[in-house]
Image (cartoon, grey):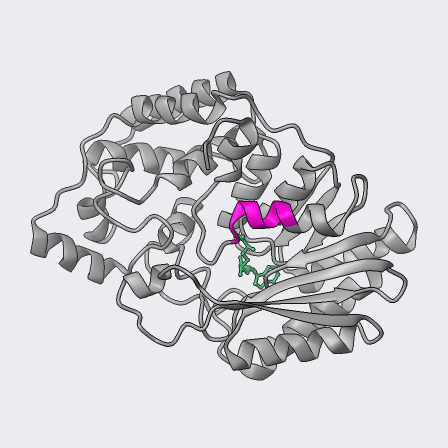
Amino acid sequence: MSYGTAYERWAGVGPYYAMFPVSFASKVVQAYTLPGQRVLDPFAGRASSVFAGAANRRPSVGIEINPVGWIYGKTKLSPAPAKDVKARVKEIARLAYNLPTNVGEDLIEFFRYCFSENSLRFLIAARENLDWRRTKVDRTLMALILIDLHGNRSRSFSNQMRQSKAMSPDYSVNWWQERGMQPPEIDPQTFLEKKIQWRYAKGVPQIVDSTVLLGDSCYLMHRLGEQVATETQRRFSLLFTSPPYIGISDYHKDQWLRLWMLGGEPNALRVREKHRGEFASRDAYKEMLSNVFAQAAEVMSQSGYVYVRTDARKLTFEITRDVLREAFPRWSEKIIRRPYLRQTQTALYGDDSAKPGEKDIILTGPRA
Ligand SMILES: C[S@@+](CC[C@H](N)C(=O)[O-])C[C@H]1O[C@@H](n2cnc3c(N)ncnc32)[C@H](O)[C@@H]1O
């Protein structure tokens, strides 16, 4: 990507595990819809599908249960003005300066290995003061902080870490200790001002009315269903999504440090709430997918398309395919294999379990 346009600069917001390539999202939207037609993604992640739809003049709606993905999506669809975000950075820096000297001492040792004292104070002030659920400026700043919260030591707030996925506290501390690595000494205000400068340098994306909702699709799809039933909204022409994989990814554990920034607990334990951890049980997984896809079928146009990218491994693939057949019984089906061409991120980090790649399931409506 050349980063020569506002679209390209904002599409990269932000690092998320198991994400679509942005160029793929745009190709699918253009191939299966016309301008003005609506796109739906009930498992939106960082909302590339919604953003691609919105930027291509297709009003789009996403739903995402993980606040990290949701903040990225909401922000790239509608970032606050740069000058307001810079002013907020300044305020947070002032609040950080006024925090008590012993702030953060109650946190696990991980935090002192991960961030310099200055950075940690700034992050704590941001965590305590940014009202990211309600205000656009605070959400935009939070999104920009989350992007570089961890990553390469020379380009982020943190000691050396992966950018897309946070490792567990004990593993990280051992790793840094073995290598004698210290957190980078940065001035958070200057650091963020430069990031803001770069992100806004080509302007902000021009998009049509689109949104991402925060919450569980099992419940929120119902709201969309009501809007379509009462004709306050038209039906969707494309259901374009990549559902979670069974027993593979835990989108909350992978993002534990970013979730701490959003007010979560300072540890990397698995989240036990419904639909918020990994899907270990076949029945619970199938029930969740059936629930969401059955409700999605109710809001789809019969002349529309379904494009689902999923894991090629047997269990996830077969369950997803069965569920889609039940939800869309009269739609015709095409499967495309997408073997990984490059080494995957998990393989790079020592996970050498078989990775056959992904499969795309494409359904065509009976009146298409
Ligand atoms: C494979 S990822 C989607 C990645 C996305 N295509 C992207 O490019 O970022 C699946 C997403 O579904 C979300 N998810 C899982 N269960 C959900 C539910 N019940 N409601 C809404 N989102 C859910 C996960 O948090 C995760 O972000």
Magenta stretch contains residue 22? yes
Give the left or right position of residue 154, taking residue 260 as reference.
left
Image quarter for ligand 1 equals: bottom right
Which residues, given as a range, are shown in magenta?
20-27
Q: At 41% across and 41% down in the image, what residue appears?
A: 146
Q: Is residue 194 above or below residue 321?
A: above
Q: Is residue 101 visible?
A: no
Give the left or right position of residue 69, taking residue 42 as reference.
left
Given residues 281 and 60, the one toward you in this image is 60
| Rendered location of residue 198, percent (x, y) | 42, 24
Q: Is residue 306 above or below residue 158?
A: below
Q: At 74% across and 72% down in the image, what residue appears?
A: 333
Given residues 249 and 140, the one toward you in this image is 249
Quarter occupied by residue 262: top left
Q: Is residue 173 visible?
A: yes
| Rendered location of residue 305, percent (x, y) | 77, 59
Magenta stretch prevailing secondary structure: helix
Q: At 46% across and 60% down in the image, what residue appears?
A: 251
Magenta stretch contains residue 167? no
Is the C terminus in the top left, top right, bottom left or bottom right quadrant?
A: bottom right
| Rendered location of residue 226, percent (x, y) | 85, 55
Q: At 63% across and 48% down in the image, what residue appears?
A: 27
Given residues 98 and 20, the one toward you in this image is 20
Q: Is residue 300 above or below residue 357?
A: above
| Number of numbered tags placed on the structure image | 0
Q: Is residue 182 above or below residue 108?
A: above
